[in-house]
Image: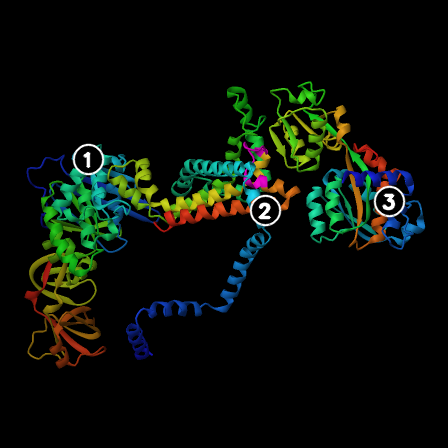
Amino acid sequence: MTETYDLRTGTESEADGLDAHLVVDRGAFRLDVALTVAPGEVVALLGPNGAGKTTALRALAGLVPLADGHLRLDGAELDRTPPESRPVGVVFQDYLLFPHLSALDNVAFGPRCHGATKAEARTQAAAWLDRMGLSAHGSAKPRKLSGGQAQRVALARALATNPRLLLLDEPLAALDARTRLEIRAQLRRHLADFEAVAVLVTHDPLDAMVLADRLVVVEHGQVVQEGTPAHTARHPRTDYIAQLVGLNLYRGDADGHTVRLDEGPAITTTEDLTGPVFVAFPPSSVTLFRQRPTGASARNLWRCEVAGLETHGDQIRADLTGELPLAADLTTAAAAELGLHPGAEVWATVKAIQTHAYAA
Amino acid sequence: MIPNDKADAATETLRGGTRRRRVRSGGGRGVPLPLLLPALLGLAFLIVPLIALLVRTPWHNLPEQLTSAEVWQALKLSLFCATLATAVSMVIGVPLAWLLARVEFPGRGLIRALVTLPLVLPPVVGGVALLMAFGRNGIIGQWLDSWFGITLPFTTTGVVIAEAFVAMPFLVISVEGTLRAADPRYEEAAMTLGASKFTAFRRVTLPLIAPGIAAGAVLAWARALGEFGATITFAGNFPGRTQTMPLAVYLALQSDPEAAIALSLVLLAVSIAVLAGLRDRWMTAG
Amino acid sequence: MTRTARRSRRTLQVTGAGAAALLALSACSSGDASSNKSDPSASDKISGEVTVFAAASLKESFTTLGKQFEKEHPGTKVTFSFGGSDSLAASITGGAPADVFASASPKTMKIVTDAGDASGTPATFVRNELEIATLPGNPDKIGSLKDLTGSGLKVVLCDKEVPCGAAAQKALAASKLKLTPVSYEQDVKAALTKVELKEADAAVVYKTDVHAAGDKVEGVEFPESADAINDYPMALLKDAQNTEAAKAFMALVQSAEGQKVLTEAGFRKP
């Protein structure tokens, strides 16, 4: 990796925060993920379904045993510590609020287990609910709460034990689109206030970008990419990320301003690089013609065929095959003007300035 | 079709209140005949003997049959023993069900089969088996006798043991089923909040499976209340000490079938009253 | 009820060996099916299946006699249903297909005759008397009925609703003894089992049951048993399917040979 994006480079002592190498065997599946997180930092484990994100989270919580590796939190070895003795708080995907307890008693459950008297635990729980803006719902049973309220109760419950490691498993997945927006903003505030390590698991790039300081992309049980959200969005290293952030991504060998792709033609870029590189460009930077454009330079011009069309917001996304498989965005009007239909032959062109090449 | 429905709905709304009834009866009409006929046959099969019992009940001398001290003694003993046997089954049966549902260990399938064995064992054989185990010469009973001077056969405790032996599998199976259906992640959530496995079980799992425990307890209680074979074999038959209602009914049948019918009727009425009462309290609350 | 039984017994004694003939006559049937087993002409006529409902205490001896009967009358088959006399009586009045009913008490036989299901007057064919069954070797040195009333002994009796219990109560009443058992068992086998399993120290049961239990229990005779002798009546049933063979079987039971098998099992001659 050519750039450094380690946010830990600060005054933190080596012992603080999370230092984990999680190895879990699940039959044919093996999770092998190294994770280092500083206090106050929020890391998102991003990956497709079945990538092992939740397994990693469960390993951190002690709900699945490590086959190998290590797990240190604030300098303390936690590998063999049972889940109930770990200073860890978990917000589960569907919250798992205890249905027989009121919201208040759900939040008081943790403090109670940590030795507080019933009255103390309830006082603490009431304070947490207050911080979440839920003081009015303390006596409500979970099934009476809305999705957003339940999410906040779950967060309050996880925070009420003052964990040194907060784990969130798809914290917004269970919410509808409108609530999600609001809760995401609130969660961001609460995570910003949280002074210890927070790790969240999500398959939603927006959640990850908004909530996390750093992304760790996991695919097939391995870390495939790591970095700040902005950097990751600009420099996808796998098709999965490229698709998430909406970029056409290719891999090839650079020689000066020309990148010869592993499969397919060459792409001219503005960067001057040598060796293996990635080249990325957004679908909106692609211009389509029905006839070979005359007068245009032959660089970055490919003959393609429309494989499919779909509406993408107020745009049309065209999936192209041919010399270079790519996605192109164009306005509905442009699509109509061009008379695009599956099977139609088109010429696609991208300006070098709109491509972005970086070392692989 | 859709406009028709809408029109119907509109007129129904205008008429008010009749719609719900219509919908319900419509559901009844939809029951396919190949299901309805056997279902009604099954219902009749279960109900007719009970009706026959009512028809043949000697209503004229029922009061005197029922006011005898022996009947009340047997009834009180039955209720006491069945309730105690249910309590014993709950105290040791629920943890057993938890073990079977939540802990992986070699031979679990075999253990589960063994637990259900009293369900298929003829109760009399169960009674003999209990004698072999807890009798005065039983493999455990002989030590109870020589160390503590405790003998269980022919005692009320013996009745409770016999009833619990026969009834507990019902509770274990019911609770195990509920536990398997319950989401084990609630226990995990409790553990991440600092609860030990036992605390998680006590404060989270137990309340979650309460309806299953209640259903199992009701089944076990009903089975214990009607228990005959194991009880008479293991605990014998002595009025006031080990003679429960089923024993009294059986022995009355030898000489006075009318009295036996009257006794059965009492047992029936009490069980229906208790089960109906519990249903209202437990089942619908869950 | 007892009187009926007694009377029929006296009648039997008068006719002596001709009991079979009497039964045949009173059954108002063709009559000459005298089952003198040595008569080959009789055995030729008899064939088919005989169904006998008999008290549980008769199991060993009747099974022996049934085999003997089948051997003497080739082509016949005796099917037994052994059980408590009262439940057998209930089955018969309920319409169970049987040819012969051999009951352990006149009282249960009366249920059948009262229902009009018997054909002719029942005849007493054996008597059974009570005995005390104790643990092998009689460790508690029980010698009489009175010894059972001693404290610390676990005694089981049959319930007073079943014949052996009624007989025991009669014996206790006759000797003016008050005995509190640990249990009133539902039948004589259950009472005996409790002693066999050493759960009880003693039980008051029939002599035949002690006999059948072999050396698992030890029998102690007691004089009061004479006050509670149990008569076993037997009757041809009205709905008998095979009257001839049924009569022949009843004759075998009452013959010298049959009585020998029964006395060997502990029964007394009527």
User: Label 1 amino acid?
Assistant: Ala
Which quadrant of the figure contains the C terminus of chain A?
A: bottom left
Are circles 3 and 1 on residues that touch, CB within 8 Å?
A: no
Q: Mark 2 belongs to which subunit?
A: B
Residue A119: assigned label:
1
Residue C251: assigned label:
3
Was residue B244 drawn as part of the magenta stretch in this picture? Answer: yes
Q: Mark 3 belongs to which subunit?
A: C
Was residue B224 drawn as part of the magenta stretch in this picture? Answer: no
- Near mark 1 (Cα within 10 A), the count class, few <14, some 14-19 or many ≥20, is few
Q: Is residue A232 visible?
A: no
Name which residue lies at 23% across and 45% down. A102
Tell me the chief SS of the magenta region: loop
Residue B2: image x %, image y %?
A: 31, 77
Q: Mark 1 belongs to which subunit?
A: A
> Seen in the image, is C188 located left or right of residue B16?
right
> Seen in the image, is C190 located left or right of residue C28?
left
Q: Which residues are magenta?
A: B234-248
Residue identified by numbered label 2: B61
